Image: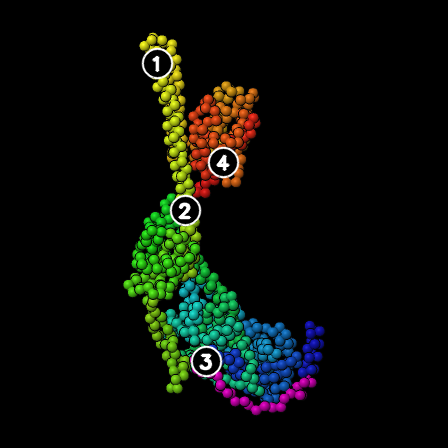
Amino acid sequence: MFLKQILINLQMRRWTFLKHSRAPGLSQIMIKDSLPTDLEKCEDEPIQRPGVVQPHGVMLVLSGEEFLIKNVSENAGDIFAMTPEEMIGSSVIDVLAEENRESLVEAIDWKLPSHTVPLRVTVKAKDGPKDYDGSVHLSGDDLILELENGREIEKRSNAVDRSVKHHFDLTARTLRLISRSQSNEEAAEVVCQELKAFTGYDRVMLYQFSEEGHGHVVAEAREQNLEPFLGLRYPASDIPKNARELYVRNFIRSIPDVNAQPVSLLPEHPNLDMSDCSLRAVSPFHIRYLQNMGVAASMSISLIEDGKLWGLIACHHYDGPHHLSATMRVSCVHFGLVVSAQLKIAARSFAATNLARRKARMSDLIRAFSTGEKVGETISMKQKEFLDLFCVDGLVFWNGEDWHREGATPSDEICEAIRGKVFQGRVQSLVAFESLSSVLSGIDLTDCPVCGMMGIWCSEDWLLLFFRKEFVYEVRWGGDPRGTKDATGVLTPRNSFREWKETVSGKCRPWSEQDHEIADELQTILAGYVLRQRAHLERLNHELESRSKEIEQFAYTVSHDLKSPLVTITGWIDATKEDLESGDLDEVRFALSRIEGAASRMGNLIEDLLDFSRIGRVTGKREHVDLSDLMERLKQDYTFQLSDCGAELVIDEPLGQIYGYPIEIQRAIENLVSNAIRHGCTRPDAKIVVNSLKVVGGRKVTVTDSGDGIAPEHHERIFELFNRLDPRTEGTGVGLASVAKVAQLHRGDCGVESVPGEGATFWIRFGNWSDK
């Protein structure tokens, strides 16, 4: 602090030296009103450089490190002991009380923004020291010091001021009430009611901008004798682009007295940028606008999100000037920053709740697709539910052949035009239009019962269209938005702000962001179902082709293999007849045994064929099958067969589980084990080892034997129906073919790995079920 005081004293000495070389006195400069009043030129008006200031405060423009007074508002003589002419060229310290020098230098060094707590500055006034609210702004190479007399303001009849405690109470209460609100409109009304009570304005409105820049009064608090503005809209020209840019930079705009005459700067400084200044004079065009509305004082608070102006809190007073102290305006700025964020959070919360409800309804619809019905059939059955979900009047579904419709829809010809013109060449596209005429030029839409469309396109033979009827509505403007012209034909601010209605037609109700989000999610889900159905059809076609080949082979083999025992039986029957005639009973007994053997083989073959034909047709429910339990049962079942061939069945635990059809899984593994017992136990101390391991895409079960092995050229052929490597061996040639069919049923495959003389390893892979 001591070092800082030394630096300040040194700087004061420089100011003391320089003040004797100040510029000579200047005469008062008259204000030149050269600003445009033509509405069409309003956006070009240099409103940030008016060259004049509002008269309820004093502005000083300082330059250089010495902070010499370069310009001063012409009303400075009303409060300072020095005249404006005497102040030009002086150090600002010459007009301030000694105790404020350090705080002012700190504020200048920190370059505090306009929405911070104002400085309490004591100036050398005519009748002694007086306290003023001060703020400092940087404008190019200049520093601007604004002074407002807070105490004088408090004495005025319409003045309003509040303490810091009131400010925090206001913000806390408003946030609490917003959190309890049930809608965006209710939350916005809370903001208006609370701010009106805090500031004392006659009317407080929350004004929201559309994408086109038009304003919409979404909430209002007013005195009972005032005409309501709630629901009215105002054209974008009411707040032109240059004004919007200033609202983003300077969060509050206060005009305590609309009818007050501005004061000029001495000397004239038309290029001074006053964007951050609260005393910046008001555009003559805006003054006329407010006067036409009967407004005597106004204040606007910016509502900003991510650097974008999305709305304003507009305050109007009608019964004379209405002054708010600098401290209170800072409270309003902070209030605006907080409630802007809170209103957006509340809006997102309301939107998220509504979106969640709609998604829950969509989930109920989507579950209908998991019942196994085709997508098109499900949509046809749930058309009314889809109409409610999207709040539409009609729905059309194209399945590649026909148009299926529900509710108000266009003709097939118009639907074909949409499919050809809108979706031509698109892949999985989502489009939405509020007017069909905008995309169907040259198509007669005279008798079309709908106006707008949202379409979901997933493939050449899959298209879902939602339609809405024309939405004719009235826009309530605050006066004729086209403006009025004066006697010379120049477009001027409106003289009347009475409600002016405009009828809007030719479009449907707009498609909201939620509509797009729901449709986009629906498209993704349905596209997945369509792709899965397409894959399912391809799999069915492949299976059908395999079945056709299988049937051909089956018919040929059955006719051959069943014919063989029949020929045997027929031959031995003839022999039996001869033996009976000759009385040779021993030969009869022998012939009957051969007939019995042939009949048994035929019975076994027929039974195996019946079992083979049932695979995939009578399957029951899919379940988890514990392979260890299954093998323990099979080991007990094959106890005698294993003992007869002198083999040992080894189960390599743990085997894990398979999800599938229990009967078919047992059939496949049982066939592999029985095949190993019959053909893989040709050596002493033979072993049959059963193993299981997880592999990519499923689980693989292997059965390894100690037999003679299989030549590579037979590895694929042995899984074909009725194929046996050695016709003399026991079996029907159906067992391994059944294994292949069970593998196919479980989305897997099978095979054998073997080298002649070294045994064989038969395996089957059970695939994972994606629809488990």
Badge 3, how many Cα within 10 Å: few under 14, some, many 20+?
A: few
**Image quarter (top left, top right, bottom left or bottom right) of the C terminus:** top left
Q: Where is residue 221 in the image (x, y as percent from the top left)?
A: 41, 71
Q: Which mark is residue 765?
A: 4
Q: Earlier in the sequence, mark 2 or mark 4?
A: 2
Q: Nearer the viewer, mark 1 or mark 2?
A: 1
The residue lying furthest to the left in this view is: 447
In terms of secondary structure, where does tag 3 sit?
helix
Identified by mark 3, the residue type is Lys
Q: Which amino acid does label 1 sit on?
A: Thr
Residue 59 position (above or below residue 338): below
Task: Please give the range of residues in magenta.
Answer: 16-42
- Residue beneath label 1, please? 576
Q: Which residue is drawn at 52% across and 83% down?
A: 52
User: How many numbered discs sit on the rendered protein?
Assistant: 4
| Contact (Cβ within 8 Å) of mark 1 with mark 3 | no
Q: Which residue is drawn at 36% across and 71% down?
A: 476
Residue 546's disc is none
Q: Mark 2 points at which residue?
A: 534
Secondary structure under the numbered disc 1 in the rendered image? helix
Can you tell which of label 1 and label 3 is closer to the viewer? 1
